[in-house]
Amino acid sequence: MVQRKLNPLALGLLGVLAASCATASLAEARPAGRAKTQARTTLAHLDTASTECFAEAVLANPVALAHAKASRWYQAAGVIGVVCRREVDRMMQARDAIQGPGAGQRYFRTVYAKRLDRELAARLRPWLERQSVASADLRNEQPVEAAPE
């Protein structure tokens, strides 16, 4: 077997080539990582906007509010119907654009729907409890007796 010595110039060029390839790979990976983070942030904001819409709509609808007071969160959201359609459509369209066709519909019917009752409970329960306490306070107040004349 014949061993050859590498020319120092060739060795230097190989080192520069390897370093530039590694730098290019890192530079390509960085924007991809940033894009994924931005996509996750966008999707999270759209999820939050949809859930906030459902929460506000439940508070504005007497039938939905009655379901919410009985902790029937899924039914409360079901009463809302198309009120939050714009927010839900935006959420689904963004998922389709980022994750592929049909991803938004699948997400809404599975992950989002399963989580919606917990999200509504977390948002609305404190408000409902404050309303309940305020109503109880009004019922428990003693009527003011008229002073004898």
Image (cartoon, rainbow, N blue to C red):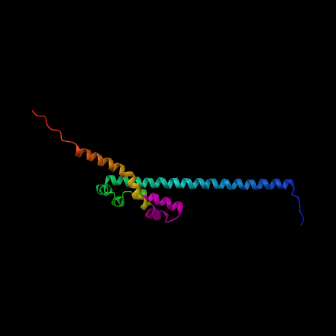
Residue 82 position, x and y percent, is 36, 60
- In the picture, which quadrant includes the N terminus? bottom right
- Left or right for 11, reference 39: right
From the viewer's perspective, is residue 56 above or below residue 148?
below
Is residue 46 something one can see in this rendering?
yes
Is residue 85 something one can see in this rendering?
no
Residue 88 position, x and y percent, is 43, 58
- In the picture, which quadrant includes the C terminus? top left
Does the magenta-highlighted stretch encompass residue 90? yes
Residue 119 position, x and y percent, is 41, 55
> Which residue range is magenta in the image?
88-111
Determine the residue located farthest toward the right in the rendered image: 2
Residue 114 position, x and y percent, is 42, 61
Does the magenta-highlighted stretch encompass residue 103? yes
Nearest the camera: 21 or 96?
Answer: 21
Question: Which secondary structure class fits the magenta region best?
Answer: helix
Determine the residue located farthest toward the left in the rendered image: 149
Residue at image x 17%, y 39%? Answer: 144
Nearest the camera: 91 or 107?
Answer: 107
- Left or right for 83, reference 92: left
- Left or right for 55, reference 30: left
Determine the residue located farthest toward the top in the rendered image: 149
Residue at image x 38%, y 54%? Answer: 121
Nearest the camera: 141 or 88?
Answer: 141
Residue at image x 51%, y 53%? Answer: 42
How many marks do you count on the picture?
0
Nearest the camera: 57 or 131?
Answer: 131
